[in-house]
Amino acid sequence: MTGIGTDQAKARGTLLRRLFGSRITEVVALMARLDLADAIGDGVADVGDLARAYDIPAPQLQRLLRALVSLGMCVEAGPGKVSLSETGALLRKDCPGSMYEFARFHTAAETTRPWLSLEHSLRTGKPAFDEEFGSPLYDHLGAHPEMSARFGAAMGDESRAAAEAIAAQHDFSGYRMVTDIGGGDGTLITAILRGNPGLQGTIFDTEEGAAPAVARLRAAGLADRCSIVTGDFFTAVPTGADLFLVKSTIHNWDDEHAVRILRSCRTALGDNGKLLIVDVLLPDRVQPDPAGLNPYIKDLQMLVLLGGQERTRADFDRLCAQAGLRIAGAEALPPHVGQSMLEVVRA
Ligand SMILES: C[S@@+](CC[C@H](N)C(=O)[O-])C[C@H]1O[C@@H](n2cnc3c(N)ncnc32)[C@H](O)[C@@H]1O
């Protein structure tokens, strides 16, 4: 018998899909960049109309659209007609649950180019981003307000599910004031304050990082219940709250910097305060091919962009101990969130 066996054919198929991952990303990235989801809209769109609107020859646009149909982003709705699938509709700008800004930021040069130097980051432990763009990511965002706004909005898209879950399931009734450290565009604190009318809030971030929060708090009618304080969490974080949050932020940093943030938190906590760390928690054993955002790919993303990393519970125990803190409990978040919540107190 000649040819390859069934198992090898399956393995080959898996390999081919892995090797073409970045090409697939380019197709979806172009759909986002062209605002194609908004152009197709709620109903059925005519390919000829779309081709005229984009000034792309119809047969060429048809090639993009059939690739998007094959990827489950669009649906064929008759000859020369397309509509959006449920997944494709997430690339509409203003729909509930929109992932448009997430898609734009994570397909931009800032987040894709450093991946080409993954080997450099692995060999040096340093973020390839700094080599590519000449400064660390957060300095670069500080110097590019448009990209900083896109980053804040992308984090908002990514954080919405976690924010809703945390606001719904955690008991905030015993607290007076909550400070979100590295609180970004305010997605998390907005969800928490909405559900807990007696609670006051503070967003602590850099000036550029907190900028998008102003409009979000105003739109939510929460501007009088939530202040924005800017500063550097490696130096100090504001005191006065009885609950602190730090979400998707410790994983941006190497151990030394992570401990510095946690030490600032310890100082602000006082004797009875509590800190909730929300981050990816890597399982002790590698999970092959995890669903959703693969945490091991995210881990490498943290390395190439920032020199950060994803961590196990044991890693967080160690970092907290170095900062004079102790993990007193853990709260699981729904699987689609892809993160866990650790309750931290002074050691
Ligand atoms: C990955 S984002 C997380 C944002 C938000 N917590 C969320 O989960 O959507 C990390 C945040 O840390 C902020 N940040 C970075 N360096 C900082 C510093 N030195 N001091 C205070 N905040 C900083 C960034 O501006 C950004 O908003």
Image (cartoon, rainbow, N blue to C red):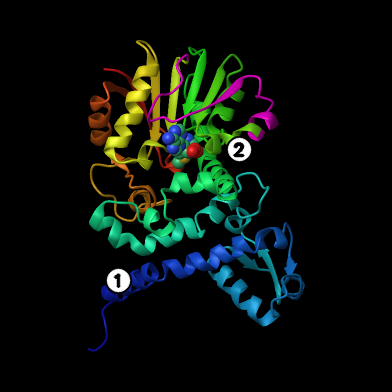
The answer to whether residue 72 is seen in the rendering is no
Residue drawn 46% across and 70% down? 23
| Label of residue 11 in the image | 1
- Disc 1: CA contacts within 10 A as few (<14), some (14-19) or many (>=20): few
Residue drawn 25% across and 54% down? 124
- Of tags 2 and 1, the one toward the viewer is 2
| Residue 194 position within the rendered picture, expressed as x and y whole percent measured from the top left | 61, 24
Q: Amino acid at mark 2?
A: Pro
| Label of residue 277 in the image | none
Quarter of the rendering containing residue 118 = bottom left
Span colored in magenta: 215-240
Quarter of the rendering containing residue 160 = top right
| Residue 112 position within the rendered picture, expressed as x and y whole percent measured from the top left | 45, 60
Say whether mark 2 is within 8 Å of ligand 1. Answer: no
Q: Amino acid at mark 1?
A: Ala
Q: Is residue 46 left or right of residue 258?
A: right
What is the C-alpha distance between the residues marked 2 and 1?
Answer: 46 Å
Under tag 1, what secondary structure? helix
Which tag, 2 or 1, sits closer to the chain's start? 1
For the C terminus, the quadrant is top left
> In the rendered image, which residue does mark 2 sit on?
212
